[in-house]
Amino acid sequence: MKTFLLFTGTGPLVVLSSHASVEDPVFLNKLDAKGISKFIAHELPLDAVKERYGAHYDIASHDLHETDDLRVIDFDGQRIMRLFKFSEYGPEFMHEPENGE
């Protein structure tokens, strides 16, 4: 499992995925299907996410499969920014569609 912090046009999201990388084309297609085509991403330490979200993480991660490989853990930007220090962010990954939209 991997957890990613995505900065999108509508605000930050913390997502959980069974994909090994935010650059995985299948993962990118899943995001695009949800209307997220342009974003900046950072991997977050899985242990920190588990600790800070507790039971909510357990519920979100329950029975995560390859066919259901993306779960939103948090979409409250204020809470996300309060829970994670910048020093915990993994390397930055920027993604935008080739047409720039």
Image (spheres, helix red, strand yellow):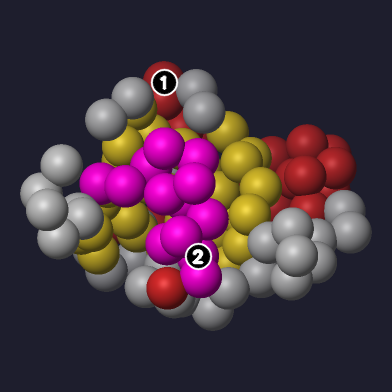
Where in the figure is residue 48, as x and y percent of width and height?
59, 55
Q: Which residue is mark 2?
A: 27
Q: Residue type at mark 2: give it.
A: Phe
Q: From this viewpoint, is residue 95 visible?
A: yes
The relative height of residue 25 versus residue 60 in the rendered view (above or below) is below
Q: Name the image quarter holding the N terminus.
A: bottom right
Look at 42% across and 67% down and name the residue there. Answer: 22
**Could you tell me which secondary element the residue under label 2 belongs to?**
helix
Badge number at residue 38: none
The relative height of residue 65 versus residue 5 in the rendered view (above or below) is below
Q: Which residue is mark 1?
A: 78
**Could you tell me which secondary element the residue under label 1 belongs to?**
helix
Callout count: 2
Circle nearer the viewer, 1 or 2? 2
Look at 34% across and 27% down and name the residue there. Answer: 11
Disc 2 packing (10 Å; few <14; some 14–19; many ≥20) = some
The magenta span reads 26-38
Look at 20% across and 54% down and name the residue there. Answer: 96
